[in-house]
Amino acid sequence: MHKIQNDKLKIAVADRGAELKSITALSDGTEYLFDGDPTWWKFSSPILFPIVGKLVDDKYRAEGKEYSLPSHGFGRTTDFWLLDATADTLTFALESNAATLKVYPYKFRLEVSFELRGNEVKVHWKVANADDKTIYFSIGAHPAVSCPINYRENFSDCYLKFNRAEKSSCLKLLPNGTLSRERIPMLDGTELALSYELFAGDAIVFDDLKSDEVTVCSRKSSKTLTVRAKGFPYWGFWTPARGGAPFICIEPWHGHADFADFTGELKDKEGIISLDVGKIFETEMSFIVGE
């Protein structure tokens, strides 16, 4: 585990998946990320790469061949190496190799960096095409934010606050994890009250949000955590449907699960990123601690 801190926050990042495991306030020890207790979910903030979500039958076609990948790809379960570390930054890297090429036929280099700036943790992703052909991928975040942040409160005391007024419907997620084209009215205004019942159908997926900041708030206390992600076309929100888990996942994505009726190649998938030879794709998000 690799750790850095400034005068406000300390963070910990694991080699496995270059996964952010902890955001802790130095002032009072408040933890803003779920600890990965497998009773509920074994992750804290995994990276989703080279796909986001579920494939139809866990299979896809690329370059005329069929491949198989589990939900969210292999990035979250693969060891990265520490590329660079300073007093306030950590940078990790993953390159395509014999194992990845068996399940994903493209050569790439993925770098993930973390930077502390006051009460903000900036996360930067850089994907480089290391192949002699165009590569296709999705990438996204899946952070489990402590909810409630104050352990003395309840999940139902909390709500999500969006930084722009929304009138949005979510895409219906089917039992097999793929998406239906049916839409369900979900968000009207700037707040979404949280309850476990809200997630009875699993994740809530939006493809039309105007907001680029979503904040976990409580009606009983002032502690907050904001996820800022500019330019991400899709957002997912999730907590286990059985109820009781002490977190809410706030997930900005470039890409999403297959629609149930999708039969094309990976390059044809809605939301997929196309990256030409020698090119680099970069994007970033932030966690902002409020007290």
Image (tube, rainbow, N blue to C red):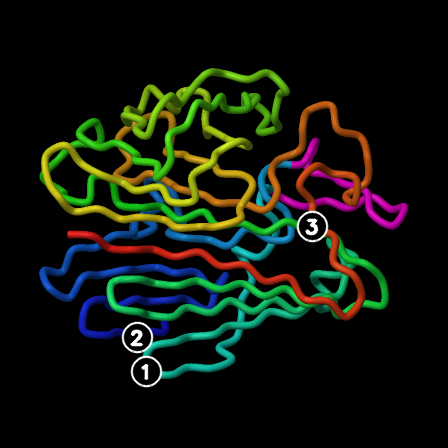
Where is residue 100 shown, x and y percent of the image? 70, 61
Q: CA distance from mark 2 to mark 1?
A: 6 Å
**Count of numbered circles in the view:** 3
Asked if disc 2 and disc 1 are in contact, CB closer than 8 Å, the reply is yes
Residue type at mark 1 is: Ala
Secondary structure of the residue carrying tag 3 is strand
Where is residue 48 shown, x and y percent of the image? 55, 51
Above/below status of 65 relative to 208: below
Identify the residue at horizontal 21%, vertical 27% (top origin).
156
Q: Which label's residue is closer to the chain start, 2 or 3?
A: 2
Secondary structure of the residue carrying tag 2 is strand
Please state which of residues 39 and 192 is positioned toward the viewer in this rendering: 192
Is residue 61 shown in magenta? yes
Residue type at mark 2 is: Ile
Which residue was labeled with disc 2? Answer: 4
Pick out the residue farthest to the front: 165
Disc ID at residue 273? 3
Q: Nearer the viewer, mark 2 or mark 3?
A: 3
Secondary structure of the residue carrying tag 1 is loop
* 53 sits to left or right of 62: left
- In which quadrant of the rendered view does residue 276 lie? bottom right
Which residue was labeled with disc 1? Answer: 87
Q: CA distance from mark 2 to mark 3?
A: 32 Å
Q: Which residues are magenta?
A: 55-70
Is residue 197 shown in magenta? no
